[in-house]
Image (cartoon, coloured by chain):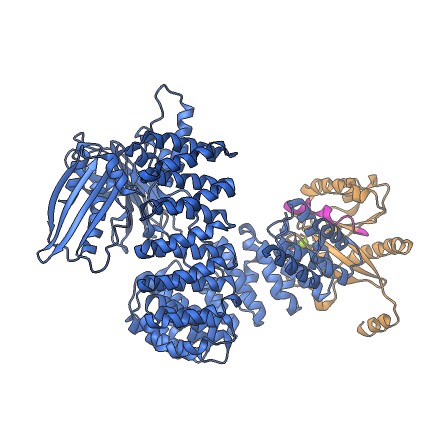
Chain colours: A orange, B blue
């Protein structure tokens, strides 16, 4: 990678950069998901609950991502909105095994969608129905019903079942997001 | 002239400073660019610098604005630019106290402090600790412990210093980091070692034994860091001071040993510590003085400066010890650095002989114009102490001071000169006329109203009693014509005093005062009207009570009493006697602000003139419903210790005297960490006639948390029976605490602890009052209830001793500086003034004569009540 990077920079070729906001309730697996995308050298082996937020960078084949990994604890959820304005896309992580709190996740999603900064933009939203490996996890279809995702009309969205620990489903999701963002960024 | 110069300077400064014209709103507007993607690091760094500049200039930023800027700044975490990131850490620290929700950056900072980029780790730790509150401390604890023992020195130091700051908020958590701090002390890096020692000390500083051990341990196992040594010296000298330990203590030996250390900074610290100790003798100081002497000839200006500055301090207490350095100091007089030269000369002035004074004064005047006000003040103070030391030289000094008064200089400098002149006048009657003349000249052209009013007050007090009072009138009246209202009012009062004291001037003073009746200012007019009417009565008693000696009540007390009076309207006129008196400031009471070892900034000065101690007590007592109808608080005694200092329980007693009652206030501290006391009260065994009315127990005395219990006692009806001895016992319920959890047991048991006796003395019934013109008061009270007797004071050796003892027995205020016995005299008269409980003026004249047989005293007491005079007389016998 190092060589190509150097060459690319020398030629003045730079990957497009995208800012994404990673939200969802606490313990849903946001930090673990981001960690999965990071290169081996920067991977974190000891994930602790996030306090506030953390910025992480990772790359896919055609995009450089800057991810704002927000804390999902109640005390911090009000602070997500400070970061809505600059983001090109949102990753919303749902713990599909935590049926009890899916309603809470839905409330937070509704608040996000209603926020003026989000409403005025056409940004793609990627949902991960995470922790699909757990026994009492609900399917992604069921998850999207519970979250009433079909009501989202003016934004592109996609839901993937995922397992952040093994990485299953994550690449598919991020591929969808990359395709969406490329369109947005090119038009800009 | 002064103002002009300043403008020019500002202009110059502005020229070199690109941020000179920054405007808050524009800068905050600009900070919105932090939100833009992609980030432009150079531009953002520039804007962030501006924000930091503004905050450091003391610009106030509102919470909303600050929070907005803060959140914008958090977005800069996506940039990897090192300069920008480090500015972000600074920004977080600066805004952590003004913006809201700053904990949003916690995880980001935790990531940086453990990350791969060493440059980020230390600053991230510092920023993290500044945003962390006690509730969050738990979640960062593990990382802090790791950072303290990190192998990167900058990281370790940052963690140690931040822990120290954190422990000011929450001692409990940082206490658990002691093992890590211990490990860091053995680090070879000088900074880490110093910071680790600082933290260790801070964690243990409330445990004297542990601190003693700490010093003992590290003074043997030699530390590598000179800074750590300096800190250890400071800790050791604080211990010496607290324990009153002498030169035989191991702490002292350690400090003395540091004089031979190889590092200059350690040597200097040790010398400085020895010089600052309260109890050292000139002989013990000798080794410290000789290292300072060596420093005087060092090629490094900082060392020379430090040495001469410290010698200057030594010279105040032990001038003889410094004479050995005179030659070196002489050499420094011509030092290129004027600060060093000034200190050298002023030190020489303090140590030199009378004969060298003239020469030194000449030398110093040659460069007075070249030194800053701060050093001019040093010179003024040196001159003042010289005057007191060589009273015969006062005219040379006075001339010098008056020359300085005429020169340019700021307020602080002028104030120092005026203070000095006043002190000299007060100490040396021979200097009085010359001093007053210089001050008169000064107020003719004085831009500082505070100084002018002060001098006018002094003229009013001292002028009438000089041989030719009339010569001051012109100077004072000029102020009435030329000055602002505050000064005019002071001048009117001064004029009235001349009229009241000097019969021959009465008529002309009245004429001048009559002209002030048309003044434009209310206060000036009111004062003039009042004085004219009073003076026209031509009654000595009135003059004394209302012009020469004035009001004696506490201003805060008066305000409170008047407020109370307006709340409950009554037919009766307001009674001045119900107002508490202004207590004379008790100098020993002033708490000396101590600087903690390792603390870099001195604590804020504490001697701001606030409510007096007594006013504070009055407030506290007024809030206790049980004491609601005791009447006005008359006097609060100074605290008396009822226990030895190192006992299980420490109890101090303050006696509050009311018209018919005494409230004994007991401040108790439980020094045992394995028990809690409940329902604690002090039982009194009263002597005849006194009766205990009520106990107000202290519900709970936890370890090291002071609590208060009160005992209310009624005084005997017989007016002359006012003194007695009370034996005291502290009674309470003890609950032992679980050694592990610190939780007290359910069940307790009763116990008691015998305290020392308390004494109600005559002094408890008398409040000190200053009568600036004692003679006038003496006439005012008159001889109706005079008591006079002659005593022989066989146990006293000197007049000074007799004077000190009489003042203490009577608890009254010495007037006319009669507490100072002039040298070489064998007769002296002491004048005391006070007010006795119930509002009776009381005056004492004590004529002392010394002969071979000892001291004899003729004691004359005047008051407005027979029994008061008798009680006061009984204080002596
Ligand atoms: N079994 C399982 N556990 C997961 C999965 N994703 C995350 N976790 C665990 O869930 C916990 C919370 O993850 P974290 O990334 O801190 O959640 P965040 O609060 O949303 O950032 C961690 O203990 C993860 O190991 C998953 O897909 N399956
Ligand atoms: Mg997280």
Which residue is the extreme one toward the top? B571
Residue at the location (21% across, 39% down)? B684
Camera-side residue of B371 and B54 = B371
**Magenta-highlighted residues:** A75-89
Left or right, B319 with reference to B301: left
Residue B808 lies in the magenta-colored region: no
Position of the C terminus of chain B, as image quadrant, is top left
Which residue is the extreme one toward the left? B853
Instruction: Classify B263 as above or below B530.
Output: below
Q: How many marks?
A: 0
Q: Position of residue B107 (x, y in %)?
A: 64, 56
Residue at the location (43% across, 57% down)? B417
The picture quadrant for ligand 2 comes to bottom right
Camera-side residue of B20 and B134 = B20
Q: Position of residue B36 (x, y in %)?
A: 79, 54
Residue at the location (12% across, 42% down)? B789
Camera-side residue of B195 and B422 = B422
């Amino acid at each position: 990678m190092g060589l190509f990077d150097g060459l690319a920079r020398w030629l003045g070729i730079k990957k497009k950069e995208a800012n994404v906001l990673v939200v969802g309730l606490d313990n849903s697996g946001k930090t673990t998901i981001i960690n999965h995308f990071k290169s081996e050298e920067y991977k974190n082996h000891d994930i602790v609950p996030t306090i506030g937020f953390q910025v992480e960078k990772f790359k896919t084949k055609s995009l450089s991502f800057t991810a704002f990994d927000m804390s999902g604890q109640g005390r911090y959820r009000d602070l997500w909105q400070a970061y809505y304005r600059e983001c090109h896309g949102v990753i919303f992580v749902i713990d599909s095994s935590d049926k009890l709190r899916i309603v809470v996740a839905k409330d937070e999603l509704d608040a996000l969608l209603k926020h003026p900064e989000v409403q005025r933009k056409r940004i793609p939203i990627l949902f991960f129905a995470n922790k699909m490996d757990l026994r009492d996890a609900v399917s992604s279809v069921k998850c999207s019903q519970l979250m009433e995702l079909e009501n989202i009309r003016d934004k592109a969205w996609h839901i993937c079942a995922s397992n952040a620990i093994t990485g299953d489903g994550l690449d598919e999701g991020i591929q969808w997001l990359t395709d969406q963002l490329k369109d947005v960024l090119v038009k800009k | 002239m002064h103002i002009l110069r300043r403008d020019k300077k500002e202009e110059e400064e502005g020229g070199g400073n690109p941020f000179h014209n920054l405007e808050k709103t524009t800068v905050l507007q600009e900070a919105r660019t932090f939100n833009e993607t992609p980030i432009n690091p150079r531009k953002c760094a520039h804007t962030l610098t501006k924000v930091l500049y503004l905050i450091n200039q003391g610009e106030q930023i509102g919470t909303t604005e600050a929070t907005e800027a803060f959140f914008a700044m958090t977005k800069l975490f996506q940039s990897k630019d090192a300069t920008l990131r480090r500015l972000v850490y600074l920004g977080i620290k600066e805004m952590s106290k003004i913006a809201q929700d700053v904990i949003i950056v916690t995880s980001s900072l935790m990531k940086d402090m453990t990350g791969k980029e060493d440059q980020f780790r230390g600053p991230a730790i510092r920023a993290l600790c500044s945003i962390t509150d006690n509730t969050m401390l738990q979640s960062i604890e593990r990382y802090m412990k790791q950072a303290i023992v990190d192998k990167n020195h900058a990281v370790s130091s940052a963690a140690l210093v931040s822990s120290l700051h954190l422990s000011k908020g929450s001692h409990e958590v940082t206490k658990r980091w002691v093992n890590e701090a211990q490990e860091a002390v053995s680090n070879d890096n000088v900074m880490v070692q110093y910071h680790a020692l600082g933290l260790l000390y801070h964690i243990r500083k409330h445990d004297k034994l542990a601190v003693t051990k700490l010093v003992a341990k590290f003074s043997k196992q030699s530390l590598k860091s000179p800074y750590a040594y300096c800190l250890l010296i400071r800790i050791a000298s604080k211990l010496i001071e607290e324990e009153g330990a002498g030169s035989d203590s191991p702490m002292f030996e350690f400090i003395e040993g540091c004089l031979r250390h190889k590092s200059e900074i350690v040597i200097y610290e040790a010398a400085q510590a020895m010089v600052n100790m309260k109890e050292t003798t000139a002989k013990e100081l000798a080794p410290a003085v000789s290292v300072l002497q060596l420093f005087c000839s060092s090629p490094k200006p900082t060392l020379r400066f430090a040495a001469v500055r410290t010698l200057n301090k030594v010279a105040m207490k032990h001038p003889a010890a410094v004479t050995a350095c005179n030659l070196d100091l002489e050499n420094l007089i011509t030092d290129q650095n004027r600060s060093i030269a000034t200190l050298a000369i002023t030190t020489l002035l303090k140590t030199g002989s009378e004969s060298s004074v003239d020469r030194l004064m000449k030398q110093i005047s040659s460069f007075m114009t070249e030194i800053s006000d701060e050093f001019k003040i040093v010179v003024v103070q040196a001159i003042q102490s010289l005057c007191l030391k060589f009273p015969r030289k006062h005219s040379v000094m006075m001339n010098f001071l008056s020359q300085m008064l005429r020169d340019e200089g700021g307020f602080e400098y002028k104030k120092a000169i005026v203070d000095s002149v006043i002190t000299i006048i007060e100490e040396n009657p021979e200097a009085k006329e010359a001093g007053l003349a210089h001050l008169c000249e000064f107020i003719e052209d004085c831009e500082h109203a505070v100084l002018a009013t002060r001098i006018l007050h002094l003229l009013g007090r001292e002028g009438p009693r000089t041989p030719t009072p009339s010569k001051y009138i012109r100077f004072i009246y000029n102020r009435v014509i030329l000055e602002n209202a505050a000064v005019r009012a002071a001048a009117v009062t001064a004029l009235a005093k001349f009229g009241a004291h000097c019969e021959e001037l009465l008529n002309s003073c009245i004429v001048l005062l009559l002209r002030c009746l048309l003044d434009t200012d209310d206060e000036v007019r009111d004062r003039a009207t009042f004085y004219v009417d009073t003076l026209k009565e031509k009654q000595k008693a009135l003059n004394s009570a209302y012009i020469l000696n004035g009001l004696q009540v506490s201003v805060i007390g008066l305000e409170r009493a008047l407020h109370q009076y307006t709340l409950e309207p009554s037919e009766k006129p307001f009674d001045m006697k119900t107002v508490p008196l202004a207590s004379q400031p008790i100098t020993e009471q002033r708490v000396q602000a101590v600087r903690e070892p390792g603390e870099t900034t001195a604590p804020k000065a504490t001697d701001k003139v606030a409510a007096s101690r007594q006013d504070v007590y009055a407030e506290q007592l007024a809030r206790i419903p049980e004491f609601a109808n005791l009447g006005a608080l008359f006097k609060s005694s100074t605290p008396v210790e009822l226990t030895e200092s190192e006992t299980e329980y420490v109890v101090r007693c303050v006696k509050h005297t009311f018209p018919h009652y005494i409230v004994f206030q007991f401040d108790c501290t439980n020094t045992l960490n394995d028990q809690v006391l409940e329902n604690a009260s002090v039982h009194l065994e009263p002597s005849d006639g006194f009766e205990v009315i009520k106990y107000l127990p202290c519900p709970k005395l936890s370890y090291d948390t002071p609590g208060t219990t009160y005992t209310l006692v009624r005084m005997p009806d017989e007016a002359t029976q006012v003194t007695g001895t009370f034996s005291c016992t502290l009674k309470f319920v003890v609950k032992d605490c679980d050694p592990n959890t610190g939780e007290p047991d359910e069940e307790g048991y009763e116990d008691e602890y015998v305290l020392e006796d308390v004494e109600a003395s005559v002094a408890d019934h008398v409040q000190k009052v200053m009568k600036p013109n004692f003679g006038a008061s003496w006439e005012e009270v008159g001889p109706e209830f005079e008591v006079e007797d002659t005593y022989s004071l066989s146990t006293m050796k000197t007049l000074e001793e007799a004077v000190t003892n009489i003042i203490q027995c009577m608890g009254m205020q010495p007037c006319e500086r009669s507490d100072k016995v002039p040298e070489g005299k064998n007769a002296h008269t002491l004048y005391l003034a006070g007010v006795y409980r119930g509002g009776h003026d009381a005056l004492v004249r004590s004529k002392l004569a010394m002969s071979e047989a000892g001291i004899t005293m003729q004691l004359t007491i005047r008051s407005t009540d027979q029994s008061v005079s008798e009680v006061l007389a009984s204080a002596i016998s």
